[in-house]
Amino acid sequence: MREEYMIERQGKRFVLYAGLLEEAHERGLRSIETELLQVPGVENGDVAIARAVVRTEDGKFSGIGDASPANVNRAIAPHVIRMAETRAKARALRDAINVGVTAFEELGGDEEAAVPQSAAKAPAKAVANGTREEAQAKEEGRGELPATRKQLNYLESLISDVVEDGIAKFEDMVGKQVSELTREEASEWIGRLSGRAA
């Protein structure tokens, strides 16, 4: 799994859903099917439960995911059905591509302690102004690589789901068009919008 899709929280490593999906496509993903098993409502504590079935060249893999306002970020709370689906797909994708690291989207709550894996060991001064690796990459001209099409597709989907008023509001907030984001910026926003507080 590429490091840009790994993050660290409280000393533990997690993978982003976007990384699982990209890796699965590279390994011959054939399909992902989802089914809503439980509609959230007052009688069940507003818990949504979804099932995902992933088919690859190696076979069929399934996963179950749940989400409720009690186990998601406040920004995601209105979207618990989609988060349950994402969590189910993440679990199925992890089995399909043999990733034992939990997906960040499977975690719950409003904790803000997540940092990119590359920043975990950087000194405080480097973290305040971007990670040491980002600074070095920018010096070498690599930090400005444009975001990949897969990153942009996933980010645009997240923006539509999470950001009120969609892409226009996001671009106003960020100060540039989504298509102008670097790989590092896109990765950071994917992480923020898929579960981290902005």
Image (cartoon, rainbow, N blue to C red):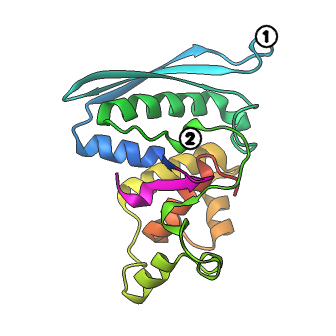
Q: In which quarter of the image is residue 131?
A: bottom right
Q: Residue at x 42, y 60 (%)?
A: 4
Residue indicated by mark 1:
43
Residue type marked 1? Glu
* Within-10-Å neighbours for mark 2: few <14, some 14–19, many 20+: many
Residue type marked 2? Glu
Give the quarter of the figure containing the C terminus: bottom right
Q: Which residue is drawn at 74% across and 45% down?
A: 110
* Within-10-Å neighbours for mark 1: few <14, some 14–19, many 20+: few
Residue 151 in the image, given as x and y percentages of width and height: 42, 56
Say whether residue 24 is magenta.
no
Residue 24 in the image, given as x and y percentages of width and height: 30, 40
Residue 24 appears left or right of 109: left
> How many marks do you count on the picture?
2
Picture layout, residue 195 above or below residue 71: below
Residue 110 appears left or right of 14: right
Magenta region, residue range: 1-12
Residue 127 in the image, given as x and y percentages of width and height: 61, 75
Q: Quadrant of residue 130?
A: bottom right
Residue 135 in the image, given as x and y percentages of width and height: 49, 83
Q: Which residue is drawn at 30% across and 36% down?
A: 97
Q: How far apart are marks 1 and 2 (CA)?
A: 25 Å
Q: Residue at x 39, y 35 (%)?
A: 94
Nearer to us: label 1 or label 2: 2
Residue indicated by mark 2:
105
Please tell me the numbered disc located at residue 151.
none
